[in-house]
Image (spheres, grey):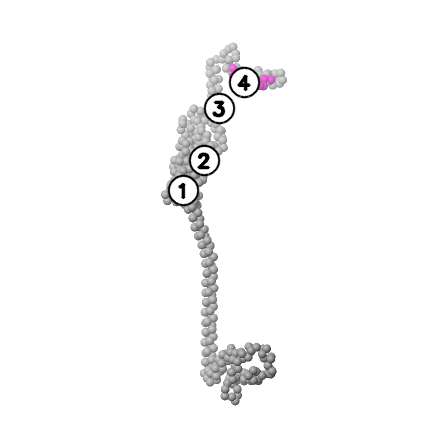
Amino acid sequence: MAWNEPGNKDPWGRNKNNSSLDGVFKDFKKTIDDLLGSGSSVPPSPKKSAGLLSGIILAIYFLSGIYIVNDGERGVVLQFGSFNEITMPGPHWIPRFIQSVEIVDVSKIRSVQQKAVMLTEDENIVSISFAIQYDIKDASDFIFNLREPDITVSQAGESAIREVMGQNSMDFIITEGRTKVAEDTKGLLQNVLDIYGAGVNVQSLNILEAQPPEQVQDAFSDAIKAREDEQRYINEAEAYRNEIIPLARGQAKQMLEQAIAYKVKLINAAEGEASRFTQLYSEYKKAPAVTKERLYLEAVESVLSNSSKVMIDVEGGNNMMYLPLDQLINRNQPKIANQDNGNQSSNGVDNTSIMDRITSNKNNFNLRKRDLYNE
């Protein structure tokens, strides 16, 4: 029959109904007493007791040297107080009293923040607030080389930012230069910490606030407003320049093209006139008298064609008659309608006869002109 069947006791003499926590401790104490011989009338031998005690102490010693490094942590093992090695995540064992271990969280982002008043390159005072975020890149250096990591990083950061601030003007720092100042300070701070052997990696350095002291805030606000007005006027002037310059260039281009066209026109006209004069001169050499008369008649025709006055040379008369056609045309029509004889003018001249004679003289003149051309 098996020992764990109902009604039987286990090999250590415990009843299966004794399942309470108090019973467990009592059974464990009883087992230890049996091993040490304290429960029997015959005490164990000293040699056996010493060996058993040594085994228990040795087991406790080995168990006490076990440690576990979690993810994102590093174990710094010290041997007699000096650095021995760095252990990675996982279970490890060290001999106690010879070696010890310190667990360092290298994944944690640490942060320090500080505010200070600093002097700029142009001898102005700026109140600045900045924050530094860092983590651990070398656990052994972090433990052995830094006593107060946050204080060390804060003081080194203040020293670095003072150096950078002393190389820039106040206007640059307060306006558009914050990002550049932060980047320069971060690089300088990392170099300083590396020289110290701090085992620290600077993740970021942010300038939270940069402004003049409270005593000069009003004056500085007025200066900023004036600077903004200046920039606004500059932008307006540049916009006007960008608008007017292309327009002026277009007008200049247009004037230049017109000048070129006028130049070509004059040259062509001059060449045409020269060509016409050359051809006319050739005809003149052939028949000078005819050409002279023809030129004279053309000149008279061009002059009299734009005139409203007509000169009539009556055959058989000694005087030339002047006919004011402009006055005859502009005369009031009702007055003409009221006259007794529609064909007689106010001074007794027959208008129809005069017009017929004008037409006849004009036809004769055209025939004479045509004959001259034909010659």
Identify the residue shown where x is 48% and y is 13%.
Answer: 45
Q: Dot 1 surroundings within 10 Å: few (below 14), some, or many (20 or more)?
A: few
Name the residue tied to disc 4: 25
Range of residues picked out in magenta = 17-33
Distance of mark 3 from mark 4, alpha carbons? 21 Å
Residue 133 in the image: above or below residue 262: above
Query: In the image shown, does 138 or 290 lie closer to the viewer?
Result: 290
Name the residue tied to disc 3: 63
Name the residue tied to disc 2: 111
Q: Position of residue 279 (x, y in %)?
A: 47, 79
Distance of mark 1 from mark 3, alpha carbons? 68 Å
Q: Dot 3 surroundings within 10 Å: few (below 14), some, or many (20 or more)?
A: some
- Residue 168 in the magenta stretch? The answer is no
First in sequence, mark 3 or 4: give its number: 4
Q: Dot 2 surroundings within 10 Å: few (below 14), some, or many (20 or more)?
A: some
User: In the image, what residue type sits under mark 4?
Assistant: Phe
First in sequence, mark 1 or 4: give its number: 4
Distance of mark 1 from mark 2, alpha carbons? 31 Å
Asked if labels 3 and 1 touch by Cβ distance under 8 angstroms, the answer is no
